[in-house]
Amino acid sequence: MNDELYEKGMEIRKAVVGPEYVEKSLAAADDFNMPMQRLVTEYCWGAVWGREELPKKTRSMLNIAMLAVLNRPNEFKLHVRGAIRNGVSRDEIREILLQVAIYSGVPAAIDSFRNAKEALSDMDES
């Protein structure tokens, strides 16, 4: 594994999804799933999110759309909160999900609107 990419990934991961979430994920990791935590941090956050060709706001917008289509509610909610941290507005999130409805299906968009509303509400309460 590449320690430099891991450290870069850890910095980006904490900035996007929040240090509390990352620390909780790492604290819950054991011998079985720690390699996955390392892989995600190094590869997803360091090698890909660490590239400069797309701004983090754009990456967040893409993630929201893809996770909505894939129906991955836990990761979707996490990335909705990350998108807000990366400067994506609530109006932009709504527009992304309307786009999802047209190109990927209304059921995916309906679930994603519900999950986004929950994530945003949780943020408002914090």
Image: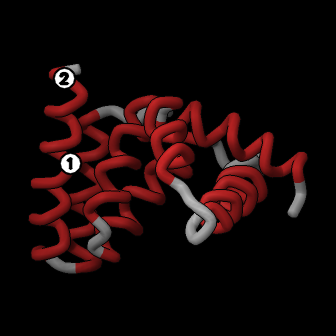
Please state which of residues 13 and 34 is positioned toward the viewer in this rendering. 34
Q: Amino acid at mark 2?
A: Asp
Residue at x 58% of width, y 35% of height: 14
Q: Position of residue 82 (x, y in %)?
A: 43, 39
Q: Position of residue 47 (x, y in %)?
A: 77, 57
Q: Quadrant of residue 31?
A: bottom right
Q: Quadrant of residue 36?
A: bottom right
Please state which of residues 88 and 121 is positioned toward the viewer in this rendering. 121
Q: Name the residue that disc number 1 marks.
A: 116
Question: From where the camera sits, is residue 22 visible?
Answer: yes
In the image: residue 62, left or right of residue 12: left
Number of numbered markers: 2
- Whether 104 is drawn above or below 65: the answer is below
Image quarter hosting the N terminus = bottom right
Q: Quadrant of residue 12?
A: top right
Q: Which mark is residue 96?
A: none
Residue at x 78% of width, y 41% of height: 8
Say whether disc 2 or disc 1 marks the residue closer to the N-terminus. Answer: 1
Q: Secondary structure at mark 1?
A: helix
In the image: residue 78, left or right of residue 90: right
Residue at x 69% of width, y 35% of height: 11
Taking the view exactly as shown, the residue that stands out farthest to the front is 31
- Whether 1 is drawn above or below 82: the answer is below
Q: Name the residue that disc number 2 marks.
A: 124
Q: Amino acid at mark 1?
A: Ala
